[in-house]
Amino acid sequence: MSKKPNKVHIKTGDTVLVMRGKEAPHFDEKGKKVYTKGRVIKVLAKENRALVEGVNMVDKHARPSQANPQGGIIKKEAPIQLSNLMIEDPKTKQPTRVGYKFVEGKNGQQKKVRFAKKSGEILDK
């Protein structure tokens, strides 16, 4: 019996901020909160995880192959838990929650879109 995929608030191509983990927010010299930011490469809904560009980098030991004749240690992204990510608000550049609403689409049909709760900006194009 396979597990049903969870409903996720993040899609491929979204810009997300890391809220927890080894790349959690920290404060700079001026006391401003600094977030680690990245673009979502792939969403793994069944595992409730996502691959984010440049986040959660791990070392992978690879033996020599046709594609990689040198072999050695390769740095690559590891999946990160979705609960540790928040979408970046397009207007304020701060983390925001995601809401859903219906807007008028093509042919006068209703279309369900995601919007940023902080600014009300629509996230889906």
Image (cartoon, grey):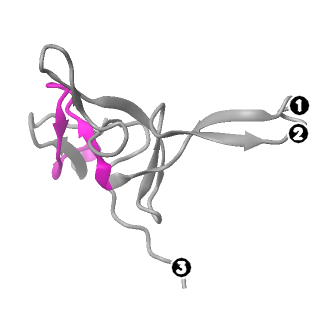
Residue where numbered disc 2 is placed: 65
- Between marks 1 and 3 in the image, the one whose residue lies nearer the viewer: 1
Amino acid bearing label 3: Ser
| Crowd band around label 1 with a 10 angstrom C-alpha radius: few (<14), some (14–19), many (20+) | few
Q: Secondary structure at mark 3?
A: loop
**Pick the front one: 17 or 14:** 17
Q: Point out the stretch of residues depicted in magenta.
A: 83-107
Q: Are marks 1 and 2 in contact (CB under 8 Å)?
A: yes
What residue is rendered at 29% in x and 38% in y? 24
Amino acid bearing label 2: Ser
User: On screen, 86 above or below 91?
Assistant: below
Q: Secondary structure at mark 2?
A: loop
Disc marking residue 69: 1
Q: Is residue 43 visible?
A: yes
> For the residues marked 1 and 3, what is the alpha-carbon distance in whole angstroms?
37 Å
Q: Quadrant of residue 91?
A: top left
> For the residues marked 1 and 2, what is the alpha-carbon distance in whole angstroms?
5 Å
Q: Position of residue 89 (x, y in %)?
A: 19, 32
| Count of residue discs | 3
Q: Is residue 9 visible?
A: no
